[in-house]
Amino acid sequence: MTTATLDIKRRAVRIPVPAAMLEAEIMIPSHAHGVVVFANESGNIGREPRLHSVAASFNESGIATVLTDLLTAEETRIDSMTREMRFDVALLSKRLVSIIDWIAGETDLGRLPLGLFGASTGSSAALEAAARRPAAVHAVVSRGGRPDLADCLDLVRAPVLLIVGGADAAVLELNRQALHHLHSIRQLEIVPEATHLFEERGAMDRVAQLAEEWFTRYVAGGEEEW
C-alpha cells in the first residue's frame, strides 16, 4: 500500500502546554487503530523530511501520527546557544503529558490506543510521561535516546524499545545501563554502523521498520503490556 492510495485526514493544530502553545501536524488514516506521538525536543520536526517519511510508514499501517516539537521555535533558538532547554526533561515531560491529555479529549484520536516515539532527550521525556500516564501510554520507542535522563524508569509499565546506532558508542552504553532499570517489557535493538542521527544509508529505514513493528504489536495490535 502506498500513501497515494490512503485516505488520510490531515490537520494542523496548536496544543496548549505549560508556558507555550505547540504547533502539531496530525495525520489520521481511515480505519486507524492506534496513534503515535512523535516527541522531539527541538523546533525542527516540521523541517525534518525523514521523520515525515517514518510517519507516512506508520500511516500506511493504520497508525495515526501526531508530529510536534516539545520546544517552541524561539526556545529552540535560545537552546541552540545555551544547550540547556533540551536537557530540561522535567519541562519536556510535562509538555508531553499535556499533549497526551489533549489527545484524550479529541473525538477522532481519544478513542485510539497511544504510543510515544521519542528521539534524544525527547525519549527521556516520553519515558517520564509514560510513567505519569500509565493507563494512556501503551508503548514507547526511543531512537538514539537518553533514557538514562529519565528518573522514573522503574515506574514505566508500557513496553519499551530502545533503538541505538552501533557506532554511537557512548549512547549505546547509556541505553544498556538504562535497560536494567526498566521492569516492563523491554528490548534493545542496535542498527549496525549507524551513528547518533541515523544518517547512514538505510539506517532510518531500519528504525522505521523496528518502531512500526513495536507499535503494531503493542499499540495497534492491543497486546497486553505485562
Image (spheres, rainbow, N blue to C red):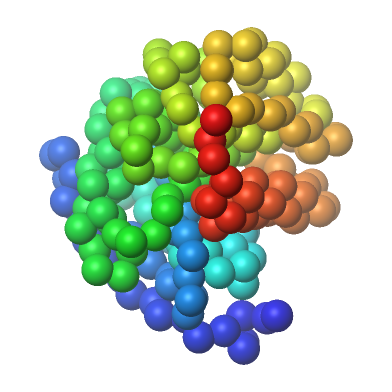
Q: Does residue 40 appear in the picture of this structure?
A: no
- Which residue is at the front of the view, 6 or 168? 6
Q: Is residue 14 left or right of residue 139?
A: left
Quadrant location of the N terminus in the rendered image: bottom right
Which x, y percent locates residue 176?
68, 16
Q: Toward which corner of the image does residue 35 lie, by quadrant?
A: bottom left
Q: Toward which corner of the image does residue 192 lie, by quadrant?
A: top right
Which x, y percent locates residue 84?
35, 23
Q: Residue at x 75, y 19 (%)?
A: 169
Furthest toward the bottom, the residue is: 5
- Which residue is at the front of the view, 218 or 149? 218
Furthest toward the left, the residue is: 19
Q: Is residue 166 above or below residue 59?
A: above
Quadrant location of the C terminus in the rendered image: top right
Q: Residue at x 14, y 39 (%)?
A: 19
Q: Is residue 185 above or below residue 19?
A: above
- Which residue is at the front of the view, 132 or 171? 132
Number of numbered labels in the structure image: 0
- Which residue is at the front of the view, 210 or 45? 210
Q: Is residue 158 left or right of residue 60?
A: left
Q: Residue at x 47, y 54 (%)?
A: 36
Which x, y percent locates residue 123?
49, 33
Q: Does residue 209 appear in the picture of this structure?
A: yes
Q: Is residue 24 left or right of residue 181?
A: left
Q: Residue at x 54, y 40 (%)?
A: 224
Which x, y percent locates residue 137?
41, 41
